[in-house]
Amino acid sequence: MLRGAAVNNTERRPALHSLLRAGSGGGERYAAVAATRGRMRDLAESIRAGAHTGHTGRAITDVVNIGIGGSDLGPRLVSEALAAPDTAPRAHYAANVDPDDLAAILAPLDPATTLFVICSKSFRTEETLANALTARAWLGAGGVADGDLARHCLAVTTNLEAAAAFGIPAHHCLPLWDWVGGRYSVWSAVGLSCAIALGWDRFAALLAGAEAMDAHFASAPPADNLPMLLALLETWNCRFLGAGNHVVLPYSHRLRRLPDFLQQLTMESNGKAVTRDGAPLAGQSAPVLWGSAGTIGQHSFHQLLHQGTRRCPADIILPLAPEDPADRENHARLIANGLAQSRALVIGRSETQAREALLARGEAPAEADRLAPHLAMPGNRPHSLITFPRLTPEALGALLALYEHRTYCSAVLWDINAFDQWGVELGKEIGRQVFAVMQGDDDGAALDTGTLSLVALWKAANG
């Protein structure tokens, strides 16, 4: 993978997302990466300095990223984890084609000081294009003439013709390459909204942290190789201990989007039923990944982790120090909660121990006997603790690259292709068919009677 071999064998492509964060290199691919990185830096610095303005000459205060999947989850996570929320330019993210999503974002914004970054490799992604058209109409209603649209819109795309037809000229478009999968693309121009919100130095530090993990993955022996170890644990828990799920528990509010990002990374990459050669897979592949910020989950689903019948391997993620030293006491409480959950998962509590605790608090022996089974916990619940000093750009870059490489190692162990996503494509195809029937442009002969009956319900509800 790191050498550029065609590890995506169904599409005959390499998966060279690690090249996007490399500090040096050679060849045409790296030259293109370096040139794009330079353009990203110039744009981000120009916007942050107020040199790139809206149509009235006022500085840009808000950047709205329009994308979906990898063009949304990665940049959203990075911005929320690292950007100062009250410092302009502020980054916002619209992904859902449900009009309420974009409407809620735009309601408090000023068209004169808003910039849209439209991320779509083909410039045809249905949800992204629908939101982009809504954004263009909002700008127009706010006084932005067609000739000034480029001052309020940038695109990350390879389809320059479609972007130009939309109103975005080529010099306001940044490229993507087919050797970068969407879920691995935050390091590319897809991360432009992050670079604007964070500043280039902090975005460059994110890249450097990921590059450091790339070097570790490439050189560390297996016994010390973090991505390999996580993949072996995932395989052991999934395939040999029967755990069909994996829970991620970041003890950091700023990392609350990490489970969402890792859902796509894990399940879109490794949710496969055939080997690289197309043969049926003999055992389970990717687990169902879920989770939330740690202390939130403690008052929700941690009950199942401790006493439920399902095995739920967990990653407990702990930034050990706060960003602001003034927050040390509350942050210590946060970390104490994470360490306590880890210990409880390990040691559990026997019925005997539960009965003794009940007697110590004054329960009668008969009542202690009755309640003890309800207070007992089996313990020996599998989990990992991933720690780092504090949530810096370098640490976040290393953490995301760690999970990327873990995902690839698991795919190698299971002999599957981690870099295609044909299951996603079928739904898109059918979605276009259904929409055509809803609009009266197709007679629906290719659809089943169940779907057609639901389209009829939709028509009835819409007059």
Image: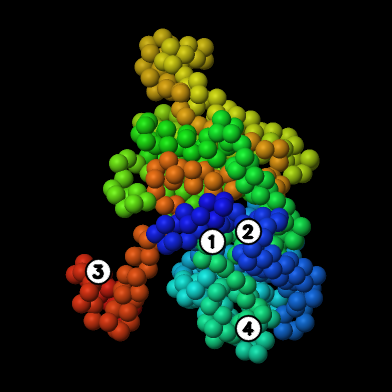
Sequence-first tag of 4 and 2: 2
User: Label 4's element?
Assistant: loop
Camera-nearest label, 4 or 1: 1
Q: Quadrant of residue 146?
A: bottom right
Marking on residue 451: 3
- Which residue appears at 53% of the width and 71% of the height? 120
Sequence-first tag of 4 and 3: 4
Q: Is residue 225 left or right of residue 437?
A: right
Q: Is residue 168 among what the camera can see?
A: yes
* Residue that numbered label 4 is attached to: 169
Q: Badge 2, how many Cα within 10 Å: few under 14, some, many 20+?
A: many
Sequence-first tag of 3 and 1: 1
User: Label 2's element?
Assistant: helix
- Which residue appears at 57% of the width and 57% of the height? 17
- Give the amino acid at mark 1: Val
- Give the amino acid at mark 3: Thr
Calculate the distance from the C-alpha at mark 3 to the C-alpha at mark 1: 35 Å
Calculate the distance from the C-alpha at mark 4 to the C-alpha at mark 3: 41 Å
Q: Are marks 2 and 1 in contact (CB under 8 Å)?
A: yes
Calculate the distance from the C-alpha at mark 4 to the C-alpha at mark 2: 24 Å
